[in-house]
Image (cartoon, rainbow, N blue to C red):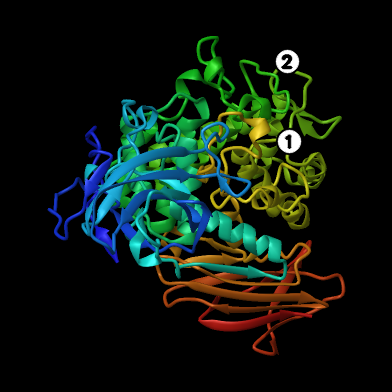
Amino acid sequence: MPLYSPRRRFANTRPLAAVIAVGWLWLAVPFASAAPVHLFDEPPVQITTVAPGVVLVDFGRVAFGNLQLIPSVNAADQTVTVHFGEAFAGERIDRKPPGSVRYAKAAAVLKGRQPLVVAPTPDARNTEQPKAVLTPPEFGVVLPFRWVEIEGWPGDLRPENIKRRASFASSWDDDAAAFHSSDECLNRIWELCRYSIKATTFAGIYVDGDRERIAYEGDAYLNQISQYYTDGDVQMARDSFDRLMKYPTWPTEWAAHMIFMAHADWMRTGDTRWLAARYAALKTKLHLGNARADGLIVSSEKTLKNDLVDWPTGERDGFDFKPVNTVMNAFHLRSLGYMSDLARALKKDADAADYSAREVAARAAFQQCLFDPARGLYRDGEGSDHVSLHANLFPLAFGLVPPENRAKLAQWLGDRGMACSVYAAQYLLEGLFENDGAGKALALMMAPNDRSWKHMLDSGTTITWEAWDQSYKKNQDWNHAWGAAPANLLPRFVLGVQALAPGWNRASIRPNPGTLKNADGKVPTPRGPVFVRWESGGTFKLSLALPPGMSAQVQLPADKNSSRVFLGGKPVAAHRNGQWWILDKEVTGTVVIEAR
């Protein structure tokens, strides 16, 4: 049960003292309207004695929170020392962990059998910055930890004597989503990423991890789409959007991600009232003032330094920065397309026509100025001869590559591998999945090297990292939700469930099996969950259950030997398009469809 359930608030309020005596009654404090967070009691998974007078407590996974001690003996004025750890070294907590990996120490004085909350002192790096998102002061200090070591505990430490008070979104539903496949490594990757999204809801606003606890637009968008597919709540994304409108950050592409966030909300909810109140502010996120006559945007000497491409800088695959560069213009084109959709939804027809015309002109210039027909790839920018992974992955993910060039470009990206960060991997894998590269996308997720989610699993983390490995970012933290892309990629592409219309009254079901033999899962939508199970092997069989009020366009992988599609055991009208069977009519309810 939750100990306390306030609403998030944004005031720069100081946390309480490091050690707090917990009473049985709490004062309810009204908070500003935002996604609420709760403190949840979590029991230990294991308690062991690791040295004389030293007890190690394992909570199984990292969570943001603090500790509650409940003495069972009348230990008056007994001092205990508590070590909090996010990393392990040998058989003990790593007290000198790398980068921003967390270790902290606190002392507490037991007062008879009175429960105590134990936490370290606040970290100035993430509590005193003006843009830092603060947790409710009534919680006390929270930090990410899995293990604690306790010195000086009187007698035996039993499970009833200790609890972690973990902070999560109060609305989080562990049963909202599910994913399982024939590959156990992929199943573990899904759970790592699903839990990462849950664990990083601790602040009520999407933040970039524990080092700064600042909201960033690119991080927030990746959080948003993953939360939609693991929990379904929309409020935290909305609160994060509003905060970012107030506290924008510096990267050029991050402005575009605000448009991405608004479009994702509209597709999720179909809510034009929320959108209408923010539409005017969204228009400022376009770079129209930097557009030249052909529609491409130009980064000035002043703004060029804000063009991100990827982060950390070592993950840019040697990108050659030019005033007219491919990545910034890919984001610009995607933003124009999304803004046209949003304007049309709000019946702002003149705006929609303007954005569409700009997109058409800029697309033509993009292809003419930045595409190298001899190589079939995009150059990094106008005047550059360098071809980076990023100059090609973003155009493919954003649908900017002409159909006749997509297969070759996707093949090239797949062969290059994960020459990008965990952030850009979201878009790299989207492009591969959308262009019949599911096998390569899954192989990259599970690659036996240090640039995959398998590597994170093998390293023992329970929340995704900021970078692929400590060697690629020395100060990385181990609680970064922008590294959890499979949380949305696996249900969107392997299960194949995506919205086809705002509000999910129509869905697209297009499973991408890759090398998998089967997969099943549950995808939360505003109309209720979608249940999917498919089996691949000789034939392709899909079992699908849609909630009331939803119809679905179904596409099934077309084996070279398959000749018909059957619905409920009877032939159904369908046509073949490349590697896909497409049913001529949409389906509703619970159906079984088979291509054989």
* Amino acid identity at mark 2: Gly
Residue to which mark 1 is pinned: 419
The front one of 98 and 310 is 98
**SS state under label 1:** loop
Lateral position of residue 275 relative to residue 87, left or right = left
Q: Is residue 49 above or below residue 214?
A: below
Q: Is residue 209 visible?
A: no
Q: Residue placed at 37% from the left, 35% from the top?
A: 282
The front one of 271 and 439 is 439
Lateral position of residue 567 relative to residue 148, left or right = right
**Residue 527, position as x, y percentages in the image:** 40, 70
**Residue 32, position as x, y percentages in the image:** 19, 45
Quarter that holds the N terminus? bottom left
Residue to which mark 2 is pinned: 383
Q: Is residue 324 above or below residue 271?
A: above
Q: Is residue 225 visible?
A: yes
Q: Residues within 10 Å of mark 2 (few under 14, many from 20)?
A: some
Determine which quarter of the picture holds residue 157.
bottom left
